Amino acid sequence: MLEAFKPYFHTVKNYLRFKNHEAFELFKEECLTESFDHHDNWNGGIDFYSIILNVPASEYVKIEGEVEEQISKDITHAFEIAIKDDDSLQINGTIIVLHDNEIVYSPSSKNMWDLDYFRLFISHLSDNKRTAANLKVCLEKWGIQGFVAHEDIEPTHEWTSVLFDALMSMDALCAILVKRFKYSNWCDQEVGIALGQNKLCIPVHKDANPYGFLGRYQMIKANGLNAQQVAEKVAECVFNNTKTHAIYCNDIMRLLLNAKTEDNALSWLNIINHFSKTEKIYIEMLWKDYQQNSVLTSPKVLNGLNELFKRYGLAQNLFSLNPQPQIEPDELPF
């Protein structure tokens, strides 16, 4: 944690907000430490420090290289500006370090999640299993796979084991709140596990308000809405929350990059276009790798991708927009 530089944290954070979005997202007080380098007695005494920014693996892989260097420079520069009137402090630079204490959980049962989808555990009473099942169906078009216990646990499996595996490997939890929800030991424990892991919890008000620590989260009012409308609001919560934003954006990009059909690709492209505030770094993931999938170089899909790339200032590509003429075997040159 910061000590000497703590008074300048918010100033630097606000500067980075306008200067470098990637740096702004990574610049969190709990991820920062100071390294005292040396003391100089000149001019009343000057303490020289380096700033260390600890970055988890999921974020570090996206910035490694030139982006990392620019983030380091911009953070250092922001601190230099902030401490101009403090002659007792000097910053030698900012060091970005890969540091991740997250435990990778290995489920004991077979994997219950589909590849590349955002993982959302849907906590509900058995009386609301139809509501949960309908929400799960509607979330799929948003790149979100819902885990609904009564649907996803096979009768031959020990259900508590599968339930625990899903809770430990989820990205977030959605709680469908009805009047008896908090009196269910299972639902209450599911929410408790999510809160204990510091995962995003999304309360959906069906006929009861969030309670306890769950009340810290902005609830979705489901009154008068159908499952598709609730699913859209859940997706927007996932996109807008700092705990899940990067995971969700990465998932959507991978779903598009691995699309099997044109219709499938266009549906994921529509989702990306729905979230107009997607950062450029995620669009660059598409721009760098989309040519590896022939579905994405078909004229219909590529036209949509080019419109997206143009909005983000990325070069458009005409790769395979003009089909190559078919050559009969007896016309092939030797």
Image (tube, helix red, strand yellow):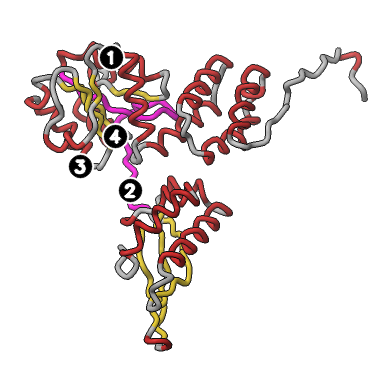
Q: Distance between the residues labelled 1 and 2?
A: 31 Å
Span of residues in magenta: 100-125
Q: Distance between the residues labelled 4 and 1?
A: 25 Å
Labels 1 and 3: the sequence-earlier one: 1
Which residue is labeled 3 in the image?
Answer: 196
**Mark 2 Cα within 10 Å, few/some/many (few <14, many 20+)?**
few
Residue beneath the point at 50% across and 21% down: 270
Along the horizontal axis of the image, is 226 left or right of 265? left
Q: Distance between the residues labelled 2 and 3?
A: 13 Å
Q: How far apart are marks 2 and 4 (CA)?
A: 18 Å
Which residue is labeled 1 in the image?
Answer: 133
- The residue furthest bottom is 41
**Mark 1 Cα within 10 Å, few/some/many (few <14, many 20+)?**
some
**Mark 4 Cα within 10 Å, few/some/many (few <14, many 20+)?**
few
Which residue is labeled 4 in the image?
Answer: 108
Labels 2 and 4: the sequence-earlier one: 2
